[in-house]
Structure formats: structure tokens, C-alpha cells
Image (cartoon, grey):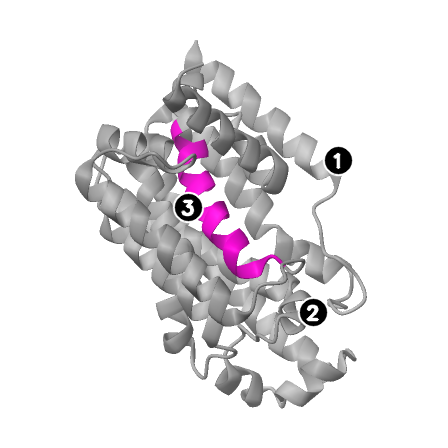
Amino acid sequence: MDQLEASYAECKRLNSLHGKTYYLATLLLPKSKRKFVHALYGFARYADEIVDDLESTLSVQEKAEALNAWGSNILRDLKTGSSNDAVGRALIDTVNTFAIPHEHFEAFLHSMTMDLTVQEYQTYEDLLEYVYGSAAVIGLEMVPVLGVLNDGAYECAEKLGIAFQLANFIRDVGEDLDRGRIYLPITELAEHGVTREMLEARELTPQIVSALKFQISRVRQLQREATPGIKLLSPSSRPCIQAASELYCGIVDEVENIGYDIFNKRAKTSTARRLRVFISAYVKRLVVSN
């Protein structure tokens, strides 16, 4: 195995280990596209691990320095067109193959840096600065790999990426509190009578339920607006994105199923639902192939 193949293999390992739902959806893509998706995921996951590894003994300052050093090397490698980094080799090859704009990776690293210092966002507009880099650009990076039939696919991909991220925020309120963060906009929480102190008490109240319902409605609205964009992608990629949309945005269905008790229960998609979605999408994939 040469160094480039080893880099793609490492990205695939990171994907299968940390992004099980994402990895499952990736299996619905044509085999020729999968390694490129793994490379994009590997970049994002590696940076995220520097920032959010709860078992790390590094201080915030040390994490910032590690992220800056690694990120600066990757951005430099993007400009030179080659890399010696275990993840970077596959990333640069993918970026070069599909002419993916470098600013997407700059935006992602900016958002990861924000995670080290920003503990809350006052408004939804404030949050969007973070979400654009942490999630929207992932969708924008994916579009060239998936195959685009119309440029309208980019706006839809951005919205779907935001929907995925917001669904995670709703599910992970308790975990994010452990990291000292609240991603749900403070002013919107206040409109439902929710304060940071109420969230930190980790007791489900009618006010918190009301705030979660509002956030869930936004996820579903973004998903509806993004869905037409799937038809603007290459037919062979559509089943994958349809499955990912149902599974990731479906997180909010699971929040409802646990009675919104995000503090004491983990909202997760059942194995049965995962299999049902995967099998349905796989059948569609076979039809396209034939």
C-alpha cells in the first residue's frame, strides 16, 4: 500500500469508527466516490478530535496551539498541492481531483477555533457564523464529489448541512453543557422562558420543551427546503443523501420519542430504522445502477 492509499485507508477508519451513520450512508454511494467522502470526513474528524477530546489532558491554550499548527500545515498543503500528513494526503488529492474551494477548509478550521473560546451564541445569526464553518461547508465540499447537475444543489446542500448540525445540537444539549457550551441561541431560549441556569440544572421543564419544539421545527423547515436539491445531484448519489437526510434529521424524531428528556436519555436512531432506511435506499441505488 502506497502512502496515498494508506491515507485514504486512515480516513476510512476514522469514518467507520466515529461516524457510524455517516459511514452507513457512504456505503450507498458508488464505490468510486466513497474514498473521497472518507477523506473529507477524515479532515473534519481529526480537527474535531483536537478540540473536543474529553479525555485529553491538554489545556485550552494547548489545544488551540495544536489545532493552529495542524490546520496551518493543511492549509499550506492545499496551496502547494501535496501533503505528508496522514490525513492530509487523501484530502489534498480529493480537493485537487474535484477543484474544491480552499476557503471551505479555512471556514471549518475557524469554527473549530471558535469552539475553544465561545461558550454561547446570543442570536441565531451569531450561531450561523459557527454553523456555516462546522456544517454548511461540509455539504458544499460534498457536492462536487456527489456530482452536480445544477448549481442550485449548493444552496440546498448548505441548508441540509445546517439542519444536520442543529439536530445534533438539540440532541446533545447535555453533552455540550459538559464542555461548557450552549449552542441553542440564548435570545431564542429566553423567548420560551429558558435561561442558561435552567439548562445547567438539567431538569426538563415546560419551558425547555417549548424551546426544543421551536428548534425542531427549524430543522424540519431546513430539511424541506433542502430536499429538492437532491434531484440536482447525480442519480447515483441521490439514495445516499436521501438516507442521510432521513437519518440525521430524524434525530429530532427520536428527541420527541423520548419525551424531549435530553438530560437523562440519549436520542438515537434505532437499528431497525437504520436498516429500513438503508435497505430502501440500497434498492433505489440498484435500480439506478441497472
Q: Residue at x 62, y 90 (%)?
A: 193
Q: Which residue is mark 1?
A: 272
Counting other residues with Cα less than 10 Å from the Cα at mark 3, is it few (<14), some (14-19), or many (20 or more)?
Answer: some
Quadrant, the N terminus: top left
Q: On the picture, is 269 further left or further right than 122?
A: right
Q: Position of residue 142 (x, y in %)?
A: 35, 39
Badge number at residue 227: 3
Which quadrant would residue 217 be assigned to in this image? bottom right
Q: On the picture, is 231 further left or further right than 34?
A: left
The amino acid sitting under disc 2 is Gly
Q: Earlier in the sequence, mark 1 or mark 3?
A: 3
Counting other residues with Cα less than 10 Å from the Cα at mark 1, is it few (<14), some (14-19), or many (20 or more)?
Answer: few
Compare residues 16 and 196 and report the one nearer the observer: 16
SS category of the residue bearing label 3: helix
Q: Residue at x 56, y 73 (%)?
A: 214
Nearer to us of marks 3 and 2 is 2
**Residue at mark 3 to residue at mark 2: CA–CA distance:** 29 Å
Badge number at residue 174: 2
Counting other residues with Cα less than 10 Å from the Cα at mark 2, is it few (<14), some (14-19), or many (20 or more)?
Answer: many
Q: Position of residue 53 (x, y in %)?
A: 60, 57
SS category of the residue bearing label 1: helix
Compare residues 67 and 130 and report the one nearer the observer: 67
Quadrant, the C terminus: top left
Q: Tell me if residue 128 comes above or below residue 81 in the rendering.
A: below
**Residue at mark 1 to residue at mark 3: CA–CA distance:** 23 Å
Q: Is residue 80 magenta?
A: no
The amino acid sitting under disc 1 is Ala
Q: Does the magenta stretch mainly form a helix, a strand or a loop?
A: helix
SS category of the residue bearing label 2: helix
Q: Which residues are magenta?
A: 36-53
